[in-house]
Amino acid sequence: MEYVLLSRSGVAVADASLGAFNDLKLGKKYKFIIFKLNDSKTEIVVEETSTEQDYDAFLEKLPENDCKYAIYDFEYEIGNGEGKRSKIVFFTWSPDTAPIRAKMVYASSKDALRKALNGISTDIQGTDFSEVAYESVLETVSRGAGSH
């Protein structure tokens, strides 16, 4: 089945992008997925999938001067001995140093990908590494921990 969502910018979400997300969400095959726009800026495609558990390995995949989208299966401990929780986090990485055109296209294309991916609990907008640091993301995801 061909499943394509178009954004305001006319960018579509590739089938493989949805497949990779479902593999992460349902199959727990990946720890994170990095998405990018293809060279012709018409489709959101998977750039890379990874099973690497180290959060720093994920951060190293975010380029200093270019935009990306990412999905991360974020696990964290809950206080009171409640154990581990896991939340699927959607990242829009748009560093200040990225080209203006790239930032505009990624901003206007985000909704198509975001709406296509069901089951995301948290959105993180990152313009520099402090905003996507583990502690920042942990604070954001754990804020909603008690409200289900």
Image (tube, helix red, strand yellow):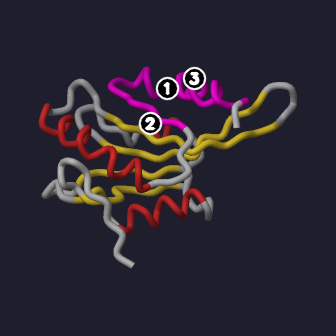
Q: Position of residue 127 (x, y in %)?
A: 33, 26
Question: Mark 3 — residue?
Answer: 135
Amino acid found under the numbered disc labelled 2: Leu
The circle on residue 59 is 2
User: Are the two marked residues, 3 and 1, in contact with CB atoms closer than 8 angstroms?
Assistant: yes
Q: Secondary structure at mark 2?
A: helix
Q: Is residue 124 inside the magenta stretch?
A: yes
Check if residue 142 falls in the magenta segment: yes
* Residue designated by label 1: 133
Instruction: Relative to 27, say whether 98 is above or below.
Output: above
Amino acid bearing label 1: Ala
Badge 3 amino acid: Glu
- Asked whether the residues under the numbered discs 2 and 1 touch, taking CB atoms below 8 Å apart as contact, a structural biologist would say yes
Task: Kindly report which numbered mark, 2 or 3, lies closer to the viewer in this rendering.
Answer: 3
Q: CA distance from mark 3 to mark 1?
A: 6 Å
Q: CA distance from mark 2 to mark 1?
A: 8 Å
Q: In the rendering, at what x and y percent does residue 113 appear?
A: 36, 51
The residues colored magenta run 122-146
Q: Secondary structure at mark 1?
A: loop
